[in-house]
Amino acid sequence: MERLSDILHLRREAEHHVSDLPALMIKAEKISANIMHGMHAQRKAGSGEKFWQFREYQETDRPQDIDWRQSAKTDQVLVKQREWQTTQRTYLWCASGASMDFTSSPKHYTKQDTAHIIALSLALLLRQSEEQIGLFGDLKTGHSEDKIQNIGQLLLQQSTVNAPLPDTTHFALPRHASFIGIGDFLSPIEDITRSMASVSANAENGLLIQILDLAELELSYKGRVRFRGIKDSELELVNNVASIRQEYKQRIKHHTDQVKALCHEQNWSYILHNTSDDIADTLKNIWQLMDSTQVQS
Amino acid sequence: MIAFFSQMIFMQPVILSALLALPVLWYLLRITPPAPKTIIFPATRFLAGLVADEQTPSKTPWWIFLLRLLMVTLIIIALARPVINPSQSLPGQGALRLVIDNGWASAQNWDMQITAAEEAITQAGRESREIYILPTTINTGQAMLEQFGPLSSGTALSILRGLRPNPWPADYKALAQYLDDTKERKSIHSLWLSHGLDEGQIYKVISTLQNQGGLSYVSPAPEKLPLLLRPSKKLTQKKNKEQRGNIKINIDAPDNIATALPVMVQALAQGENIIDIQTATLSNTELPKTISFDMPEMMESKITKFRLSGRKGAGSLFLLDDQFKKRKVGIAAPAQAELSAPLIEASYFIKRALEPYADITAGEITTLIEAGVSVIVLPDIAAMPAETLNALEEWVSAGGLLLRFSGPNMAELQGEQFLLPVTLRAGGRSLSGALSWDEPQTIKPFAESSPFYGLEIPDDVTIKQQVLADPDQDMEHKIWAQLNDGTPFITANTEGKGLIVLIHTSANTQWSDFALSGLYVSVLKRIIRLSGLTNLSVERSYTALDPLLIMDGFGSMVSPSASILPIPVENLDKLVPSRMHPPGIYGRGKTQYALNIGTNLPALTPVKNLPLSVAHSHYEKDYEIDIMPYILYSALVLFCLDWLIMVMIAGSSFMPLRRQTLGLLILCTLIMPHNVQASDAQDLHFSKGLYIAYIKTGDAALDALSQRGLEALSSTLKRRTSVEPVGVVGLNPESDPLAFFPFIYWPISESQNNYSSKAIKNIQFYLDHGGTILFDTRDQNRSTGGIANTENARALRAITASLNIPPIIPIPDDHVLGRSFYLLKDYPGQFSAGTLWVEQQSTSGRDNVSSILIGSNNWIGAWASTSKNQAYDRYKNDYDSRQREMSLRFGVNLMMYVLTGNYKADQVHIPHILKRLGK
């Protein structure tokens, strides 16, 4: 499979996977129509459109805020307060670097491509439900067509940078934002824990999508193999791969379990995607997860 | 050289010792594991620590080892240069004697023998060895074997070209004698290029040759051993009432011949026309093999010879003479069913005696005459109706042969005697009986003037009764046979154009036991053979038969030379052809006798059990095959296979590489080596159409003239005939294959190139395999008729001296060349007076097309001058346009002749031709 090298291509792939999910799309629409409308009631007075309460006019209030009809019913001058509403803002983060740029079989997308497709697909889905979306590292969010395009471009630009985990040193997630992190998360669990902790400090809710290759899960090689990691120092000569397969599978299972546990600790959702699986299926799962978390909230 | 298989040797056997290193290689391959494939794997971190646990060394699968060992073995074998059918290396040291069989059996493998001899001579020349050549037959006109030598390789080659197979057996007895007589002082190694048969005393010759310095014996491979046509015991046999004959001929072969050898026998009529072909498969368990030709009697009588297709020489030809022409014999007797005692009737004896040699009908005399029989036998018929008698008399006078037997009826005849050679005394004579004191008489040996001269008379034949003749003046001329007491036994006399023969005893056993003897059959046979001859005379000398047409060693019929002697009749039946009496047709007057090599030759004895010290080999096949490229190729395929396997083992991330490998593998398959010469493609192009060819003489002007002339002829052919030549090609016999061109024009030039023996061989091969060359000396104006002593003629002689060319004659008036398209009386070119020479008799299989035409009329010049090109106008000057036209017509005729053969000699066109000739 060819590499996703330009934004149009990536967009097409993403649309393709999204469009493969008419049921998902219908659901997305339903969600946005019935529940979401992009509004998240804050249950306090604010600049929303929903009525919240009447209260006595105070000096500081603007005269045009006075509800004259209600004031006429009573002796007091009443001001109509509306509920404070904010729009949900979702920040996407994609891992990038040599580790992501891997596939064991030309039949499958690399992990990077998979991550990009999932990211953009989510962006498309979220836009349909009028969510504000943005990329981690850039405060601005939006739900315009331009924004989607911009996200795609940025994803492709960032893919050359080696960023196995979200970098919180230069960017802090705004409060009440949602965080969706996509990557292979093969870094040591301590690093992941540290990084997640700093992200989750502000995030209202979060979702980690761990993308792994089948070979990484199953170690599906044979014979005498010299494995080379991302760093040149990582060199392992295995004379008979079959003999260590079970042990390796245990180790990688242990690692993914740790990542999953970490997510649950922070009340985040976790999904493992295998690049040999259908992206659409994973998208469906992700959407269900987001749905439930958002409805809860 | 190490013989590996019987037919395969290694040219560089030393290299095979490298095979000993294979176990080492095996060891090395085993301890070196294959290089690990490297895989970039992001999760490598998780592998850390796991690896240490797993230290079992990985193994290369055993079949990869095997593959690689096989590969190396193949390469080593290939480097040792294995060769199938290797050329012989020259045996021995010092002088070399080539003993060359040139008897009848050698003709069938003559080319192979000569090629082997040439190779040996060339090699001996290279090694500066003295060469002796010793043929094993004595030529006609020689008294003893002749050994040539010591010779240089050049002279040896020219002597070799002069050697011809003879149509008689090799004389090993004389060879042994010769070798005993002429003991060389020095040791000579002999290379015997044999025909593979033992012609008596071979072991004596072998031991002598070995004693004189060693012997290598070369014989034809089992499938090439000589075959011999022999007469079948019962050559002809009446099969059924539908007047279909059944001619049989035997094929004999030495019993070590290859099994299941397919053979084809052709029955030929006059003029080499094939009447019938029978195929069979020879097997060495069933020899001789009988081949039957089943054909209507009409055709049967047309057969003049049988020929083994694809084999040359006397042994593969069987000539038929009058003996085999079946005559129609009528027996004046009632049909078999009406006979009272069928098995003792006279007609039964006659019938049994003549059945194999004649078509016999029995019936009324008038019916027989109507049936057109040539012989009528009257067994003891003394009287017949007047009209029958008249008819019979008329028939005899017109040339019939009447054979009469006497018997009781004739002896008791009271009335007038008729149609008898002599006047009979009434009553007959009883030599043995109750009332006779005389002993039964025996037959006196036949006199030289008798047609029965030479027949052996069995002792136990006695005549008990006979009819006696009244003596008259001519009596002794009329007697063909007598009894011992001088009384006539067989008498004969002419009657008009016919002949009456009377046998003075009965045709059955009533009067004698003559009818029980073999002599009875022979006598009847000879009498019957006299029928159909005009001007029969009773008195004739049969002592010897002159040679009429003699077979040469290759089986062509030629006129006999003076040194060939007539055959005495008494030897006729036992004669084995020899230098005195080569096989052929012998005869005198109208009597013909075919002397065949197969008739009396003793059984063909293969040469077996050669002493171990004699190096025995077969003539090489057509070429030696170097199988090195094939083996190297297989090694390459294995290598690619190995690579492919390695790539597959090394993982799936090398897909593009694998595609390349696959491509390479396919490429390897495509470049499968074969010994195609680079020029073949171009040569094959010549097979796609008719090209007229000429020989490039190296004289540029002449070559241009040839090109132009043949182009003019080619366009004429296109315009006027259905022959559509595609182009004109100039050939160099040194390098170009000639086989694609039915006709080659060879203008002779003084500045002619000298041709190497390779070129000569090329030309000879072309001529031997159906090609035709027109040599044109182009100098008729400078000669005085014929091929004179001009420069060009000398150049021509230089070329033809080393070619094996059959005898040529000035073109006869009725030659097909004169009527193959146009009717031509002469064959003018630029000059018109020159004589055109053609082969006297074209060899078989060429459809009577002469392989060589020689003339001096400069046709090419005349043809070229018909083209528009002014440059060739100088060929126009001295003659008119009609002559130019006639020369073109000659060209057209020539091409037609070359392409269609004797088609126009066919009688079908005679009426038209006669009409146009105004006759």
Image: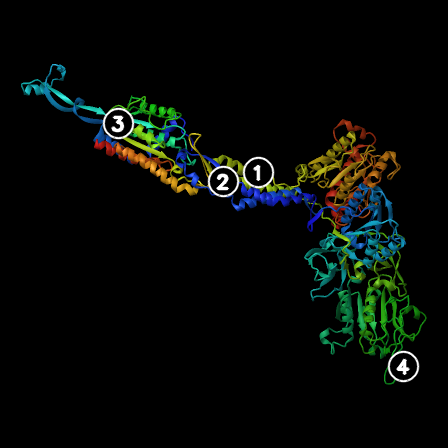
Element type where label 2 sits in the image: helix
Mark 1 / mark 2, whichever is N-terminal: 2
Residue furthest out toward the bottom: B434
Dot 2: within a 10 Å radius of its alpha carbon, few (fewer than 14), some, or many (20 or more) residues?
Answer: some
Mark 2 / mark 4, whichever is N-terminal: 4
- Closer to the camera: disc 2 or disc 4? 2
Q: Which residue is mark 2?
A: B648
Q: Tag 4, which chain?
A: B
- Closer to the camera: disc 3 or disc 1? 3
Q: How is the image coloured?
A: rainbow
Between A149 and B105, the one nearer to me in the picture: A149
Q: Which residue is mark 1?
A: B667
Element type where label 4 sits in the image: loop
Residue A203, disc: 3
Location of residue A138 with respect to B482 vertically, above or below: above
Q: Which amino acid, mark 3?
A: Ala
Q: Tag 3, which chain?
A: A
Position of A84 with respect to B730 (left or right) is left
Residue B438, disc: 4
Q: CA distance from mark 4 to mark 1?
A: 103 Å
Dot 3: within a 10 Å radius of its alpha carbon, few (fewer than 14), some, or many (20 or more) residues?
Answer: many
Element type where label 1 sits in the image: helix
Dot 4: within a 10 Å radius of its alpha carbon, few (fewer than 14), some, or many (20 or more) residues?
Answer: few
Q: Position of residue B104 (x, y in %)?
A: 80, 54
Element type where label 3 sits in the image: loop
Q: Tag 1, which chain?
A: B
- Closer to the camera: disc 3 or disc 4? 3
Between A248 and B487, the one nearer to me in the picture: A248
Q: CA distance from mark 3 to mark 2?
A: 49 Å
Residue furthest out toward the right: B473
Q: Which amino acid, mark 1?
A: Leu
Mark 4 / mark 1, whichever is N-terminal: 4
